[in-house]
Amino acid sequence: MVMTHSFPGMLLACLLLTGLAHGEAGPAAAAASVRRSCPEGSKAFGSYCYGLFSIAQTWDNAEMDCQSQNSGHLVSLMNEAEASFVASLVTENGVSKNPVWIGLYDPNKNRRWKWTSNALFTYQAWAASAPSNSNPGYCVTLTSETGFKNWKDQSCTSKNYYICKFKS
């Protein structure tokens, strides 16, 4: 009898067994522990917790509030999967038309965008005609027109809801 095994399947099995042998929990337990470590009212995605705050704040005040909440920052979006998770978090919480602050901003007003968390700015999801050249804003929101998946620049003194991201 000849048995064939796929290399990726064997590798996964070895990694799981090695982890269990060393007393580590399996993937389901690891996912559950991430969820348990997020504060009430926030949701886990990957190794981070995300909290939507439906209190309108200026961008600066929102970022300061995020820093006071478990040393977080306004959310940085690193890829499409994370952006989709955040969009669903906003829509599930009944935010229908209000823009929502994220942690992207232009500190030197030269169109060189940065995340407040200092994460690399590699993923972009600008809405059509954004960022604006005719009426530039230096802070960024998720917009309801695109299901909260795309970004628009806005005046930092506008008051909007916001999302914080912090380590779980």
Image (cartoon, helix red, strand yellow):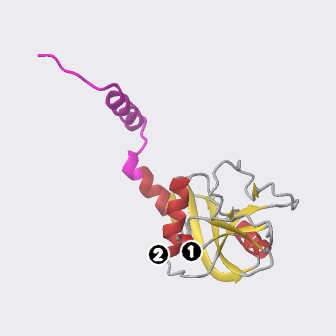
Q: Quadrant of residue 3?
A: top left
* Residue 15 within the segment the image draws in magenta: yes
Instruction: Say whether disc 2 or disc 1 marks the residue closer to the N-terminus.
Output: 2
Farthest residue in the top direction?
A: 1
* Residue 86 within the segment the image draws in magenta: no
Could you say where residue 11 lies in the image, as x and y percent from the top left? 37, 28
Could you say where residue 60 lies in the image, as x and y percent from the top left? 79, 72
Q: Quadrant of residue 86?
A: bottom right
Label 1 neighbour load within 10 Å: few <14, some 14-19, many 20+ = some
Considering the image in quadrants, where does the N terminus appear? top left
* Residue 93 in view in this figure: yes
When the figure is inspected, residue 60 is found, relative to residue 21, above or below; the finding is below
Could you say where residue 106 lies in the image, as x and y percent from the top left? 81, 61
| Mark 1 residue type | Glu
Count of numbered tags: 2
**Is 124 on the left-hand or right-hand side of 13?**
right
Viewer-side residue, 93 vs 43? 93
Callout 1 secondary element: helix
Viewer-side residue, 125 vs 18? 125
Task: Write down the region rendered in magenta.
Answer: 1-29
Label 2 to label 1: alpha-carbon separation: 16 Å
Characterize the magenta stretch by its predominant secondary structure: helix
Considering the image in quadrants, where does the C terminus appear? bottom right
Residue under numbered circle 2: 92
| Mark 2 residue type | Glu
For residue 82, the mark is none
Seen at 73% across and 64% down, the residue is 131
Residue under numbered circle 1: 145
Callout 2 secondary element: helix
Seen at 77% across and 75% down, the residue is 61
Viewer-side residue, 115 vs 124? 124
Seen at 40% across and 32% down, the residue is 15
